[in-house]
Amino acid sequence: MVIRLPDTFSIAVFGLTFLFLQKGGIMENNPGKKKIDPAKMQALRSLPVEIKQSLTREEVDAFLHDEVWPDSLREKLKDYFVDEN
């Protein structure tokens, strides 16, 4: 039986992403925060890599949980806003 593992880069990226989510409070048991909306998580995942890499933990947390975003997050995502009117 042969098990093919992902390349080292993929493993490193997966590991860093897991640690970021775990240490950033997303996977922590935090009773003060609501459960993550799957649509918000999908929207976050669909952002371009360079945008995701520029987000701080606080901005990711605000994106997933808060109704009002900090100015820094709004500035980074301004090109992705859609006018609902």
Image (cartoon, rainbow, N blue to C red):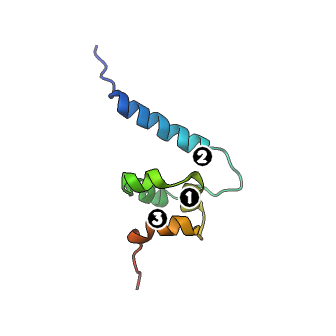
Which comes before the other along the chain, label 1 or label 3?
1
Who is closer to the viewer here, 10 or 1? 10
Q: Which SS class for mark 1? A: helix
Q: Residue at x 45, y 50 (%)?
A: 53
Mark-to-mark CA distance, 2 and 3: 19 Å
Q: Which SS class for mark 2? A: loop
The percent position of residue 34, horizontal first and vertical second, equals 63, 58
The percent position of residue 6, horizontal first and vertical second, equals 33, 28
Which comes before the other along the chain, label 2 or label 1?
2
60 relative to 10, above or below: below
Amino acid carrying label 2: it is: Gly
Q: Residue at x 62, y 47 (%)?
A: 25
The residue indicated by pointer 3 is 76
Specify few, some or many for label 2: CA neighbours under 10 Å numbering under 14, 14-19, or 20 or more.
some
52 relative to 4, above or below: below
Residue 3 image-quadrant placement: top left
The residue indicated by pointer 2 is 24
19 relative to 82, above or below: above
Q: Which SS class for mark 3? A: helix
Mark-to-mark CA distance, 2 and 1: 10 Å
Query: Is 68 situated left or right of 7 in this image?
Result: right
Give me the disc on residue 23: none
Specify few, some or many for label 1: CA neighbours under 10 Å numbering under 14, 14-19, or 20 or more.
many
The residue indicated by pointer 1 is 59
